Amino acid sequence: MKKKLPALLMLAVLFTLIVIPRPASASEYTFDVQRAKLTTSDDVLIMTKSTSKYDEVWEKAGVTDPKAKLDELKNSNTLAVFYDPATKCTVNFSAKQSQDIVQKFSFDFMTDEEIIDYIKKDLDADPDHKLYSNPEITTEISVEEFNGKRFFRLFIDSMASTDDMIQKTYEYIYGIIINAQIIEFECCSMNGVRPDESFIRSLVQNLSFTQVYTREEYDEIVHNARVKLMIIAICFFGLIIFFIVFAIVRKRVNKKRIKRIAEETAEFHNKRKAGSIPDDLPVRYTCSCTYNEQTITAYMTYQTWIRFLPVLIPCALLYIYLMYSMFIRNNTFIALITLGAGIYLLYSHYTRLERIKESMKKHYAANPEVTVRFRDDYFDVLGLGAISEYTYLQVTSVGHYNGYTYVYIGDEKAIYMLDKNTTPGSAAELRAFVKGKKKTSLSKAKK
């Protein structure tokens, strides 16, 4: 457990560094997708989909059930909820897009009368309002200008039924169509008291746009997005097809390779039995190793991490990029789940390696010594309670780490030895010798 403690502490530190939100301006909020920026006074509270249900801001805003409010936000087009302690007014800030809105594109291309008619038709299509069929609903619709942009102002006076009670309801909505989207501020009161309109007007007054597109610019953006999406789709499905073809080809190649290895191995053993390959062939290299905690730890490190660095590094970079993207886009909940899953996988992998190490130490406790003798036609392994002989065609890879040379027979099985006990010559010469013999064996097998 002492060995695991530093790793766990490091993970905890990384978790803290990533999760703690970065400080931002207390009165300025940017909505990148909507190309909008909103400034408020410092005492105004803001709640979004990424706000924790345990945040004290909900209580300050008078929300008794934060979870229900968060569910409502996640199932709606609401981007943020603003609460003004001075007026006790809550304003929902939302944005949405539809085919009809895209066709309208902007209020800049509509007269005041056309804007009012559009809002009336939109209300009549809403089953909650039904302007022309419900005499109990009265509305006021007008067009007002804020910062050079025209907004519609809608006031609705109606009766709402809740929990078998009929209550007087007042609702203010300010909105604008710009950049092929409709952006709205909505304030509703169901307690029979008409809300203070000053707060919602101040929000509209302080709304600005970081980018306003022309229809041509927007069409070009949509076109480029479609092209990128098509390229991504082609690459995605292309990769799937590539991996399927690669897997099929690799399976066939491996099948042929296994068949060649089996044939050559059988031929080698037949020659050995017949005496065609004598026992007294000169030994080119002799290596020895003791299977103890040091050698097993080095092997597990190489087998698990070092050997797969070409795959692990891109995966780690992709994971970090995904985490960064999720936090930047305020997908905090998903990001925390992903982070927790990553930490759990690392911890599970670490504990699994510890168990394998202990199992290996017990397995080789009785016969920990191994000697490997490399000859021109084959190599043999003495020790570990048995004697084995291998051809160089059976070697799948040769590696080196922390003073040890690894000769793999298959993907998992490795014969490892101390480089300092390699005689004669150096470890580099040994690896070059084994790789050369493997290459020669492959060339002969293909003929």
Image: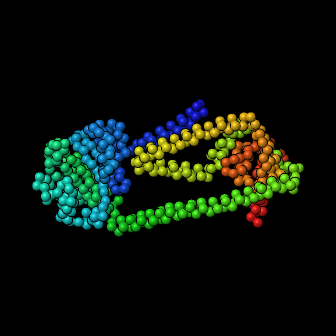
Residue visible at 59% across and 52% down in the picture: 311
Residue at 25% x, 47% y is 91
Name the residue at 64% across, 62% down. Answer: 252
Residue in the image at 35% along x and 46% along y: 49
Residue 217 coordinates in the image, percent (x, y): 36, 66
Q: How many marks?
A: 0
Where, by quadrant of the figure, is residue 180 drawn?
bottom left
The colour mode here is: rainbow
Q: Quadrant of the C terminus?
A: bottom right
Q: Position of residue 244 (x, y in %)?
A: 56, 61
Looking at the image, residue 20 sits to the left or right of residue 210; the answer is: right
Relative image position of residue 297 (x, y in whole percent): 67, 39
Position in image of residue 411 (x %, y %): 67, 51
Which residue is more in the foreground, 242 or 98?
242
Between 352 and 201, the one nearer to me in the picture: 352
| Residue farthest to the bottom, as pictured | 216
Closer to the camera, 409 or 98?
409
319 relative to 298, above or below: below
Q: Is residue 329 above or below residue 15?
A: below
Locate residue 194 relative to residue 25 in the image: left or right.
left
Say left or right for 416 vs 188: right
**Whether residue 58 is visible:** yes
Quadrant (top left/top right/bottom left/bottom right) for the N terminus: top right
